Image (cartoon, rainbow, N blue to C red):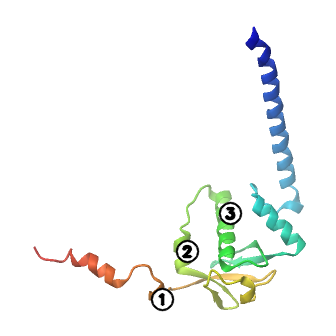
Amino acid sequence: MDSGSGKPEEVAAYQSSEAKQARLQSMRAALLDDPILADVPRKPALADVDTLINLELGSAMRVTVVKLDNTSFDVAVSNAATVKDLKLAIRKKINEIEQQKMGHRHISWKHVWDNYCLTHHNEKLIDDSSALSSHGVRTNSKVCFSPHIMSRVHQKHSRRRKHRFFHGLSKKL
């Protein structure tokens, strides 16, 4: 009998928690469907909301990224952002777009950044630690993807290492 007295309270608490969760979900859906909040991601992280607030306050900038097929999208980064911060914002935005269109799809970002770079007014943004403002990137600037071939100095594997690997395979027995 003792356990029977606790169960109705547990069920009521569970139903109350379930009701709160349902109200929260419906409120979030209603807010995200509002046209004023169209730039808020479907599952926003605190950093996303913080960046959007800073964008409204003027301490962040919106940058338009033009892909090779001439389609574009906007990303928001802080005014003190580096090239690496912009790349991370692009990565997040493209992953979000791909998730909405086709579900889960893996993009090799190492391959992307090894073969393409970002340019602003024909200046390549190669140094990840440099500030975007030092390259003239401001609010409403356009940044484009362009093909980029790394010099041999920056490649990971040297020719000598490849030669050593294949040297043992070419010996005659």
Q: Which residue is mark 2?
A: 112
Q: Which amino acid type is shown beneath numbered disc 2?
A: Val
First in sequence, mark 1 or 2: give its number. Answer: 2
* Disc ID at residue 151: 1
Question: Relative to the observer, which residue lies in front, 111 or 33?
Answer: 111
Bin the neighbour count of mark 1 within 10 Å (Cα to Cα): few under 14, some 14-19, many 20 and up: few
Which residue is painted at 86% across and 46% down in the image? 27
Bin the neighbour count of mark 3 within 10 Å (Cα to Cα): few under 14, some 14-19, many 20 and up: few
Q: Position of residue 11 (x, y in %)?
A: 78, 23
Q: Residue furthest bottom?
A: 122
In space, the residues marked 1 and 3 are separated at their CA atoms by 32 Å
Bin the neighbour count of mark 2 within 10 Å (Cα to Cα): few under 14, some 14-19, many 20 and up: few
Task: Determine the image quadrant of residue 120.
Answer: bottom right
Classify 157 as above or below 13. below
Q: Which residue is mark 3?
A: 97
In the rendered view, does 134 fall on the left or right side of 163? Answer: right
Task: Determine the image quadrant of residue 40.
Answer: bottom right
In space, the residues marked 3 and 2 are separated at their CA atoms by 17 Å
Q: Which amino acid type is shown beneath numbered disc 1?
A: Ser
In the rendered view, does 157 fall on the left or right side of 19? Answer: left
Q: Nearer the viewer, mark 3 or mark 2?
A: 2
